[in-house]
Amino acid sequence: MLYLVQHGEAVSKEEDADRPLSTQGVADVTRLAAFLATAGIQVDQVFHSGKTRAHQTAEILASSIQKRLNIEQIAGINPNDPVDVFADTLGAMRLPVMIVGHLPFMSRLVSHLLMHEDDKAIVAYQPGSVVCLEKDSGDAWSVSWMLRPELIVE
């Protein structure tokens, strides 16, 4: 399984140029993390872009999903990075893995993996959303499920 997460809601650049998670973003990601843990989601690794909001999201998710889970910054998943280059590296990753990044990259990556077309949005990400992709024996990806924060009821 491949879990592709858009970071939680961040504060504006005017409020803080580093753009950490907002109070709502922390709440949404914490709720998402608890839901994923309860659902039994397990990953071997969590990667993030290195931007503060993605790193914070990765830390919250990892701390709920599994104890002592390795969190690592990875290059090539910033908002406007080319998705085809990163998609090629997925073959070398040991699944299941979670990747926490940004729009439009995450949306374009899903489209690239499913349809080999980067410019056709087929999922509607919102901050704190996760898309779960599954790879079949023929190396074709499909959507297993998608979850947005507002769908999680406490």
Image (cartoon, rainbow, N blue to C red):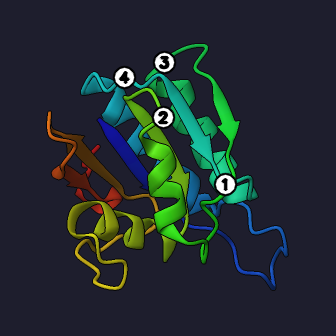
Do the residues bearing badges 4 and 1 touch, measured as CB atoms within 8 Å? no
Q: Examine the rendered structure and indicate whether residue 4 appears above or below residue 98.
A: below
Please report whichever mark, 2 or 3, sits nearer to the chain's N-terminal start.
3
Q: Where in the figure is residue 73, as x and y percent of width and height? A: 71, 43
Tell which of 141 and 71 is nearer to you: 141
Q: Nearer the viewer, mark 2 or mark 1?
A: 2
Please report whichever mark, 4 or 3, sits nearer to the chain's N-terminal start.
4
Q: Where in the figure is residue 137, as x and y percent of width and height? A: 14, 33
- Secondary structure beneath disc 2? loop
Please report whichever mark, 1 or 3, sits nearer to the chain's N-terminal start.
1
The image's mark for residue 49 is 1
Q: CA distance from mark 2 to mark 1?
A: 18 Å
Q: Is residue 7 visible?
A: no
Question: What residue is pinned by disc 4?
Answer: 42
What is the three-letter code of the residue carrying label 1? Answer: Ser
Q: Is residue 26 visible?
A: yes
Q: Examine the rendered structure and indicate whether residue 134 appears above or below residue 16.
A: above
The answer to whether residue 95 is left or right of residue 104 is left
- Secondary structure beneath disc 1? loop
The image's mark for residue 92 is 2
Q: Examine the rendered structure and indicate whether residue 92 appears above or below residue 108.
A: above
* Residue sitting at the far top: 68
Q: Nearer the viewer, mark 4 or mark 2?
A: 2
Q: CA distance from mark 2 to mark 3?
A: 22 Å
* Residue sitting at the far right: 17
What is the three-letter code of the residue carrying label 4? Answer: Gln
Q: Residues within 10 Å of mark 2 (few under 14, many from 20)?
A: few
Please report whichever mark, 4 or 1, sits nearer to the chain's N-terminal start.
4
Do the residues bearing badges 4 and 3 touch, measured as CB atoms within 8 Å? yes
